[in-house]
Image (cartoon, rainbow, N blue to C red):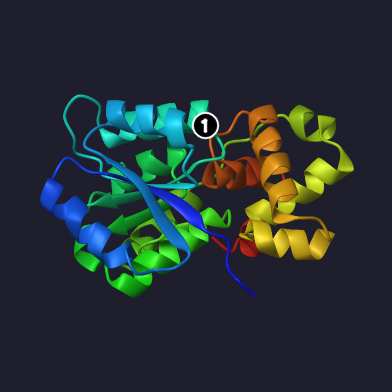
C-alpha cells in the first residue's frame, strides 16, 4: 500500500543546513519539501500558502525564533505538526517546545537519514517523537513530580467519544493506530483530535497527556510517552 505524501516545510536560518536537509529528503518518495524559510515570519507566510503537514523547525533564529513560531503556527494551523531540530541540548528548552505545541524534538548532531524520516512520519501520523538522547532526561521532569490536582469538570463535559479519544492519545497511540481501533479514517481522527485539543485548551499531544493524567483519564503507570 502506498504511503500518503507528506508535505514538509524546512525552517532554519542557515542555508547550509537547509541544503543538507533537502539532500537527505529529496529522494524519499513519500516526502515532498514544499518550501524553505529562514525565520518564523517566513514560515507563517509559507503555512498560509501551502498548509504543510510537517514543519522541521530550528529554534535559534532572528526575526522570530522557533519557539515563538511553533506556538503561533500551532494556534493558527493546528493540523500542521512541528518537529523541532536543534543544535543545543537544553532540557528546559525541550520542554518549552512541547508546551508550545511541538510534536517532536531531534538534536541536529543526532540526525541520520533514517531517524529523520522516522521522526517526520511519526509526527505526521499524529505521534510524538523524542530524540532518544534526551528522552531519559526529560521523563523525570515530566512525570516524577507530583501532578497538581485539577477539578474534573472539563472531563465530565467530554462525550464518551471524546473521553475515549483523549485516553488513546494520552496512551501514545498515533492517528493511524486510533483509526484502526475505532474503524474510522486517519483524517477523521486528526480532525476530532484538533477539536478535542481546542476544547480542553491544550496545544498538542504532550499537553493532552498531562491533562489526562491530572484529570485521572489515565494513570502514570499506563503512560507510553
**Residue at horizontal 16 percent and vertical 29 percent from the top:** 62
Image location of residue 42, percent across then percent down: 29, 29
- The residue furthest right is 160
Query: Does residue 87 appear anywhere in the picture?
Result: no
Observer-nearest of 65 and 210: 65
- In the rendered image, the quadrant that contains the C terminus is bottom right
Q: Where, by quadrant of the figure, is residue 95 drawn?
A: top left
Secondary element at tag 1: loop
- In the rendered image, the quadrant that contains the N terminus is bottom right
**Residue at horizontal 61 percent and vertical 28 percent from the top:** 201
Q: Is residue 146 above or below residue 62?
A: below
Q: Residues within 10 Å of mark 1 (few under 14, many from 20)?
A: some
**Residue at horizontal 18 percent and vertical 55 percent from the top:** 19
Query: Does residue 111 appear anywhere in the picture?
Result: yes
**Residue 215 relative to residue 55: left or right:** right
| Residue corresponding to mark 1 | 77
The total number of labels drawn is 1
Q: Where, by quadrant of the figure, is residue 28 drawn?
A: bottom left
Image location of residue 58, percent across then percent down: 26, 44
**Residue at horizontal 78 percent and vertical 28 percent from the top:** 153
Observer-nearest of 222 and 27: 27
Image location of residue 187, percent across then percent down: 69, 49
Amino acid at each position: 500500500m502506498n504511503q500518503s505524501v507528506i508535505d514538509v516545510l524546512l525552517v532554519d536560518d542557515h542555508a547550509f543546513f537547509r541544503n543538507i536537509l533537502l539532500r537527505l529528503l529529496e529522494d524519499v518518495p513519500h516526502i515532498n519539501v514544499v518550501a524553505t524559510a529562514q525565520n518564523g515570519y517566513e514560515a507563517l507566510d509559507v503555512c498560509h500558502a501551502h498548509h504543510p503537514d510537517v514543519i522541521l523547525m530550528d529554534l535559534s533564529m532572528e526575526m522570530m525564533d522557533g519557539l515563538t513560531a511553533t506556538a503561533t503556527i500551532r494556534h493558527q494551523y493546528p493540523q500542521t505538526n512541528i518537529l523541532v531540530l536543534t543544535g543545543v541540548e537544553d532540557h528546559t528548552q525541550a520542554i518549552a517546545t512541547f508546551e508550545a505545541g511541538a510534536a517532536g524534538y531531534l538534536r541536529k548532531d543526532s540526525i541520520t537519514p533514517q531517524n529523520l524520516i522516522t521522526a517526520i512520519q511519526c509526527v505526521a501520523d499524529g505521534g510524538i517523537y523524542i530524540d532518544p538522547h534526551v528522552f531519559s532526561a526529560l521523563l523525570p521532569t515530566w512525570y516524577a513530580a507530583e501532578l497538581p490536582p485539577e477539578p474534573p469538570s472539563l472531563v465530565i463535559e467530554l462525550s464518551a467519544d471524546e473521553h475515549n479519544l483523549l485516553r488513546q492519545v494520552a496512551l501514545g497511540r498515533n492517528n493511524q493506530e486510533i483509526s484502526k481501533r475505532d474503524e474510522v479514517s486517519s483524517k477523521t481522527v486528526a480532525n476530532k483530535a484538533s477539536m478535542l485539543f481546542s476544547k480542553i485548551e491544550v496545544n498538542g499531544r504532550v499537553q493532552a497527556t498531562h491533562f489526562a493524567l491530572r484529570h485521572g483519564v489515565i494513570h502514570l503507570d499506563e503512560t507510553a510517552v
